[in-house]
Amino acid sequence: MKRQIFLFSLLFACYILSAQHTVEWRFDRTGIYSRESGLLKSWPSEGPELLWHFEGLGEGHSSVTIDNDKIFVTGMTDRQGYLYMLDLNGKLLNKIEYGREFDNSYPGARSAVIPNDGKLYVVSGMAELFCYDMQSLKLLWKKNYENDFGAENTKHGWHGPPLIVGEKLIIAPGGDKHNVVALNKNTGDIIWSSKGAGVMSGYGVPIYISDQQVPQVAIMMSDYIIGVDISNGKLLWKYHHTNRFREHPNTPVYSDNMLFGMSSYGKGSVMLRLTNGGRNVEKIWELTELGNKTGHAIKFGNYIYGADERTNWYCVDWQTGKILYSDNALAIGNIISADEMLYIYSEKGEMALVKPNSQKLDIISQFPITLGTDQHWAHPVIYHGVMYVQHGDALMAYKVI
């Protein structure tokens, strides 16, 4: 009997550990929450059940991230940035001040916290990178993009979270000498530094492309989309793509040798194909209509779903760039996907459940986000059947299973 109890306990512990997984920026930077299943295919008219809410985060637009069933989120109070750790029931476990935050245009904390291997990485709007122990929130090391890398902060404050691949932590500060940098994630020491394309950051969020002969990091800088060899920082290719403000806050989307970059301010989107084992790129198509400032886009099946910067949601053929529909039934905003459905959080505070459909914007359910403050910009997150939405001062948890 004791042996049976021991085996059951061991199996249960293994199940719990296997059920836990890390949610970083837009899950894995794709916006596709692929581990979720059994989610609701429609919501009650008043919206899904609100399990709990936590208020008092201050000002900010960052999305939550999750690791080991702990929720991490940031906010700004009295110009200072704070890192919050909550459990899955919304109980505050710890809170620390990490330093000055961005209080100019659209003030507040910006970048999502990146959890990895027992550590947390936080980038402030003032372009400072902090590494903390995940359990104690003790500061382990920090970097200042201006002082350490010769970078210039972006107009609306830094918000691009770092990329971690193995022991490398990749950032794109945009300095003349230190344009793209790989740090040791444990110590903060430089592994390599690349001159890249020699231009400023465009709020770039790096992504990792592993299936080429030359594994690489792709980033949208202020004037170019670039590919950098992850082993040594060598610039592999660059493609000129900019707008009048040199700002590109959206994360690139990659699939099967094709890289989609979405800009704004009238420039729109471009689709590139990686060639010669990832050493070069060629343009496949451009589309000025599809260009969102902060909402990002997702690839679902053979289609891109995303919004423009003014009024419309689009479905676009991934291969050709052909617009299959344009619809303004929802205000523009950001988009993720889970369990074969689309989740749209509009800038007017509408949360919508949408069925993927290449012919129309197929809205199944929607409800208003009424708690919180300021802009509806933070991207929703889904973890174990719960949808987390930060709206400024408030974080809400909705049951969607």
Image (cartoon, rainbow, N blue to C red):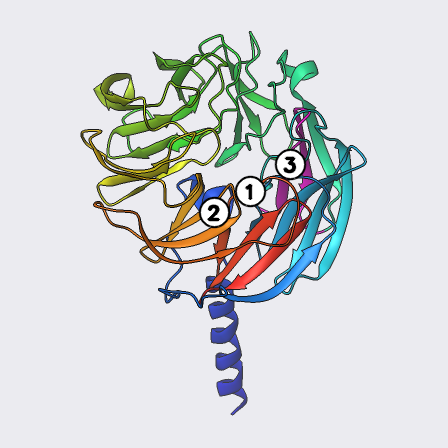
Do the numbered discs 1 and 2 sit on residues whose CB atoms are within 8 Å? Answer: yes
- Residue 123 belongs to magenta span: yes
- Residue 310 belongs to magenta span: no
Q: Which residue in the protein does label 2 denote?
A: 345
Give residue 122's mark: 3
Residue 383 in the image, given as x and y percentages of width and height:
49, 58
Give the quadrant of residue 262.
top left
Q: Which residue in the protein does label 1 denote?
A: 378
Q: Nearer the viewer, mark 3 or mark 1?
A: 1
Q: Nearer the viewer, mark 3 or mark 2?
A: 2
Residue 245 in the image, given as x and y percentages of width and height:
50, 14
The tag earlier along the polypeptide, 3 or 2, is 3
Would you call the spot at circle 2 few (<14 residues within 10 Å), some (14-19), or many (20 or more)? Answer: many
Q: For the magenta stretch, what is the residue range?
A: 117-135
Q: Amino acid at mark 3?
A: Val
Kindly identify the residue that appears in the image at 47 percent across and 47 percent down.
345
Frontmost residue, 339 versus 56: 56
Q: Is residue 281 above or below residue 16?
A: above
Find numbered disc 3 in the image and state the secondary structure of the residue it sits on: strand
Residue 249 in the image, given as x and y percentages of width and height:
49, 27
Q: Kindly tell me whether residue 231 is visible in this rendering.
A: no
Residue found at the very far right of the displayed protein: 78
Find numbered disc 2 in the image and state the secondary structure of the residue it sits on: strand
Q: Amino acid at mark 2?
A: Tyr
Would you call the spot at circle 3 few (<14 residues within 10 Å), some (14-19), or many (20 or more)? Answer: many
Q: CA distance from mark 3 to mark 2?
A: 24 Å
